Amino acid sequence: MEPLRVPEDLIALIKLREHTGLADEAAASAPDVPQPGDKLNILEGPFKGLKAVFSHTDGQQRSIVLINLLNQQTPTSLANTQIKKFA
């Protein structure tokens, strides 16, 4: 039995996604996805009501945001459902 061959174009696509990151692709296709530097509202959790700045994704379900605590930008990991871009 001959081994299964993976098409070269599929391999190239996977390498491209790995290199550029899935977040970049998702951001390009969804206008509501925050970009680094975007201002956010925190909707729930212990930081509810605070403003934050989007830093980067932390996997597919979470994001790293910067919250101003004690006059310092503090990186915090929040679920994507807890944040929303300013309108």
Image (tube, rainbow, N blue to C red):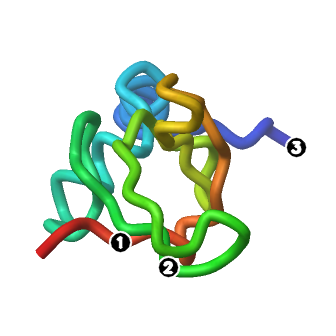
Secondary structure category for the residue under label 3: loop
Q: Earlier in the sequence, mark 3 or mark 2?
A: 3
Q: Earlier in the sequence, mark 3 or mark 1?
A: 3
> Looking at the figure, which quarter contains the N terminus?
top right
Image x and y of residue 52, in percent? 40, 50
Cβ atoms under marks 2 and 1 closer than 8 Å: yes
Q: Amino acid at mark 3?
A: Met
- For the residues labelled 2 and 1, the Cα–Cα distance comes to 7 Å
Residue displayed at 47% across by 38% down? 68
Q: For this view, does 85 lie left or right of residue 51? A: left
Residue displayed at 49% across by 79% down? 43
Q: Report the disc number at residue 43.
A: 2
**Crowding near pointer 3: few (<14 within 10 Å), some, many (20+)?**
few
Question: Tag count in the figure?
Answer: 3
Q: Report the disc number at residue 84.
A: 1
Looking at the image, the residue that sits furthest to the front is 70
Residue, disc 3? 1
Looking at the image, the residue that sits furthest to the right is 1
Secondary structure category for the residue under label 2: loop
Pair 3/1: label in front: 1
Residue displayed at 11% across by 75% down? 87
Residue displayed at 18% across by 63% down? 29
